[in-house]
Amino acid sequence: MNKRVQHYLGGCVTGVLLLAASLQTAQAGTVKVGAIFAVTGPASFLGGPEARSAEMVVEKINKAGGINGNTIELIVKDSAGSSEKAVSFAKQLIEEDKVVAIIGPSTSGESMAVKKIAEEGKTLLISCAAAEVIVDPVASYVFKTPQKDSFAAQKIFEEMQRLKISTIAIAAGNDGFGKAGKEQLEKMAPTFGIKVAASETYDSKATDLSALVAKLKADPAIGAVINWSVVPAQAIIAKNMRQAGWNVPLFQSHGFGNIKYAEAAGAAAEGIIFPCGRLLIVDSLADNNPQKGLLIQYKSEYEAKYKEDASAFGGYAFDAINMVVAAIKKAGNDRAKVRDAVEGLTKFPGVGGIFSFTPQDHNGLDIDSFAMLTVKDGKFIPYKGQ
C-alpha cells in the first residue's frame, strides 16, 4: 500500500472517530427528574429523609456515569407540607422544567392535590405518601411506594383479635393521611369483631391532646387506642396517655416509622405497637430474606452519609427514585414510555417490599410487606406479642 493510500485511509479513520465522538457528545445530556418533599415544616420527619435519600441515589448514579450516559438532574422542591405549594411546584416541574417524572410528595393531602396535575400533564408521579386513595381508584400516571392503609389496619386488627381486645378508640390527625386511615379503620373494624366506641379527629398541629385523652379514658370499655397520623402529635398522644395514667395498649399506624417519633415521646413510647416495613428491624432478619441485602445497603449508605438513623420514609423515596431510574434505563427520556416501564416492573426489590405493579395495582405490594414492630428501651424491635 503506497503512502498516499495510507494517508487517505488514516484520514478516514480519524474522521470516523471524530464523528463518533461528536455524536456521543451530542447524545449525552441531562435527564430531569422532579421531587416534591416536605423538607421543612411539621412533616419534615418525612420529607427530610426522603430528599436526602433521593439525592444520595442520584449522586451515586451520576458518579458511575449516569443513565445510558446521561446525567440525572434531580430538581427538589420544598413544599413544607403545603398542598398549595405542592400543586404550584408540580405545574412548574411539568410545564417549565419538563421533567420526565416526579417523586413525592411526602404527605397524602399533597399527593391527592397533585394527582390530577400529574394525570393532566401526562407525567409519572410516584408518591411517597401512604393513603390508599392515592392509587385507588387507579390513575394512569400515579403510583405510590408506601404500603396500603388497609393492610396496616388489617395487621393491627389481627393483633387485637389475638389479644382479645374487642372495644377501641380511634384518634386521627385532620390531614389527608389521618382522614383516609380513620375511614379504613371504621370500615374494617366490624369484619374483625371489633367495636369502635369513639372515633375522634384532632388538629394535626396540636401540641396538647390531654383533653382528647381524658374524653376517651372516661369510657371504661375502651381497651386500646389506635392513633393514625404522620405528625408530631403521634408522640404527644402517647405522652398524654401516660401522664393521665391510662395504660391501655397504644397502636400507631405505619406513619410511626421514624425513630425520631419514638425519641420525641420518650418513655411514653415504650410498648407502642405498629406495622411497618422491615428496614427498621433489618438486623433481626434471616440471612435468606430477599430484602435483607438491599435493606442493609440502603441503611449503611444513608447512615454513613448523613449521620442519622435511616427511616421508612427515606426508604419510600429510595424506592421511588430507583423505579424511575430503572424505567428510564429501559424506556429513555419519554414520559409515556417511562410510565409504561414503571407499570411493567415486577419482583422489583425495594426498601418497602418486593414490588409487582399491574394496570390494576399501582402500589404493587402485598400484606407481607408489613411486619409488626414495638418500642423497647427506646428502640424499634420485632413485636412478638404478649
Image: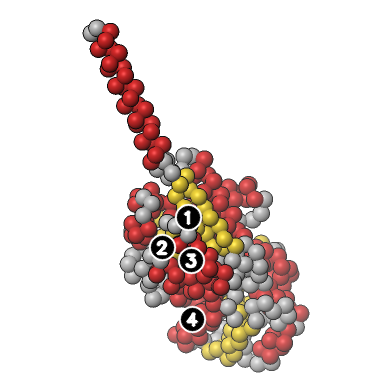
Q: Residues within 10 Å of mark 2 (few under 14, many from 20)?
A: many
Residue 137 x %, y %: 39, 76
Q: Percent x, y for residue 116?
A: 43, 73
| Residue beneath the point at 38% across and 36% down | 24
Cβ–Cβ below 8 Å for labels 2 and 1?
Answer: no
The residue singled out by tag 2 in the image is: 123
Residue carrying label 3? 91
Query: In the rendered structure, which amino acid carries the disc numbered 2?
Result: Thr
Residue in front for this viewpoint, 148 or 368: 148
Residue found at the very far left of the displayed protein: 1
Mark-to-mark CA distance, 3 and 4: 31 Å
Q: Describe the element under mark 2 as helix, strand or loop.
A: loop
Q: Secondary structure at mark 1?
A: strand
- In the image, what residue type sits under mark 3? Lys
Going from the N terminus, do you reach mark 4 or mark 2 first? Answer: 2
Image quadrant where residue 283 sits: bottom right
Q: Amino acid at mark 4?
A: Gln
Neighbours of disc 3 within 10 Å: few (<14), some (14-19), many (20+): some
Q: Earlier in the sequence, mark 2 or mark 1?
A: 1
